[in-house]
């Protein structure tokens, strides 16, 4: 009896172990394949723009040069290089001692000449009063020649006096320019720092006054871009070193002549200069590298869809319109301008539609 019990227990244990092994190692049924949802794009109404990207530098445009009015030594500086000045401020004064000495000498010579001329005139008048007309023809000719000689000498002396007076006036006019004033407002910069200690020549460039509120963005474009640009187009500007700083401007000039470095090379595409007026901003400086987006076209309230959703493998572009419940419809559209990853839909779709990416 016990023998049969052991046999039964053994059979039960073997059956249980076999079932456990079967459950553990039996092949699992494959999970059903999930179909990913289709990629869809909404048709929206937006403002679309087309831009041209440019690079260049900021340049100060309102700069007034300061020249020495005459040759002399700089007597005194009233401003420092890099200092803000206003129109009418004294910049520097020149030494006038040499000119003053020359004027005094000329005035002394003039007074002496005037006195001599008066004495000669008195002598001439007395001579005319007491002069004998002469008896013979020879005597009369001689008297006439003497009289005319004295008259001409007196006229020459008068002309010499006038010339001396003009020379004095000219030097006095130069002296009046010894104090040099700022002809504009802005930042004064010396041309050379050692101008304080050296003599200057007439017409020498001493420095300049820069109006830092007037800046322009100078850039270069190619042939294709040049034909798309017009004066007055708005520009979004940013610094290359600090792209978070945003500025605005407008195209003020598009050159109609190619740069000389490119117009002679027949193998190289021509380049053209473009000037952009920048809106005054205290954060902007001259000589800074800039980047800009020139807006060449703008359309408001445009029906827009992602360019990825438009298929162009047929004669006309088309999209798959989402009809709901997994149903789509092939729909021919008329595409317009493109900007970035979006395309204008002129006809065929309306805002609120949904298209499917196949």
Image (spheres, helix red, strand yellow):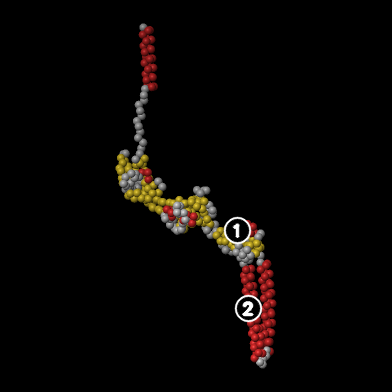
Residue at horizontal 41%, vertical 51%?
A: 50
Residue 71, position as x, y percentages in the image: 63, 65
N-terminal label among 2 and 1: 2
Residue at horizontal 63%, vertical 75%?
A: 163
Nearer the observer, 222 or 274: 222
Label placed on residue 191: 1
- Position of the N terminus, as image quadrant, is top left
Q: Secondary structure at mark 1?
A: loop
Nearer the observer, 144 or 338: 144
Nearer the observer, 267 or 115: 267
Q: Residues within 10 Å of mark 2 (few under 14, many from 20)?
A: few
Residue 240, position as x, y percentages in the image: 51, 49
Alpha-carbon distance for marks 2 and 1?
Answer: 44 Å
Residue at horizontal 64%, vertical 88%?
A: 141
In the picture provided, is 148 more to the left or to the right than 216? right
The residue pinned by badge 2 equals 159
Residue 285, position as x, y percentages in the image: 54, 53
């Amino acid at each position: 009896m016990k023998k049969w019990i052991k046999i039964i227990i053994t059979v039960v244990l073997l059956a249980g172990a076999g079932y456990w092994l079967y459950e553990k190692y039996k092949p699992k049924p494959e999970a059903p394949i999930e179909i990913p949802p289709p990629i869809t794009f909404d048709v929206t109404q937006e403002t679309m723009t087309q831009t041209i990207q440019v690079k260049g530098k900021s340049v100060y445009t309102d700069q007034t040069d300061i020249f020495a009015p005459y040759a002399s030594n700089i007597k005194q500086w009233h401003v420092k290089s890099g200092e803000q000045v206003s129109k009418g401020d004294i910049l520097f004064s020149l030494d006038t001692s040499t000119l003053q000495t020359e004027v005094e000498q000329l005035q002394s010579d003039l007074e002496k000449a005037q006195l001599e001329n008066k004495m000669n005139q008195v002598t001439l008048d007395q001579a005319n009063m007491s002069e004998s007309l002469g008896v013979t023809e020879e005597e009369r000719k001689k008297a006439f020649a003497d009289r005319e000689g004295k008259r001409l000498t007196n006229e020459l002396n008068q002309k010499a006096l006038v010339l001396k007076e003009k020379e004095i006036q000219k030097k006095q006019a130069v002296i009046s320019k010894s104090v040099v004033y700022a002809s504009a407002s802005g930042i004064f910069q010396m041309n050379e720092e050692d101008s304080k200690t050296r003599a200057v020549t007439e017409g020498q460039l001493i420095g300049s006054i820069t109006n830092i509120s007037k800046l322009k963005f100078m850039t270069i474009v190619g042939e294709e871009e040049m034909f798309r640009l017009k004066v007055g187009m708005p520009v979004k500007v940013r610094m290359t070193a600090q792209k978070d700083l945003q500025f605005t401007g407008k195209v003020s000039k598009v050159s109609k002549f190619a740069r000389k470095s490119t117009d002679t090379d027949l193998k190289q595409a021509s380049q053209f200069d473009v000037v952009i007026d920048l809106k005054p901003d205290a954060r902007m400086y001259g000589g800074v590298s800039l980047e800009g987006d020139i807006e060449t076209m703008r359309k408001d309230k445009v029906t827009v869809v992602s360019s990825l959703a438009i298929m162009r493998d047929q004669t006309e572009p088309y999209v798959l319109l989402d009809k709901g419940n997994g149903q789509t419809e092939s729909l021919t559209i008329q595409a317009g301008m493109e900007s970035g990853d979006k395309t204008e839909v002129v006809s065929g779709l309306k805002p609120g539609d949904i298209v499917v990416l196949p």
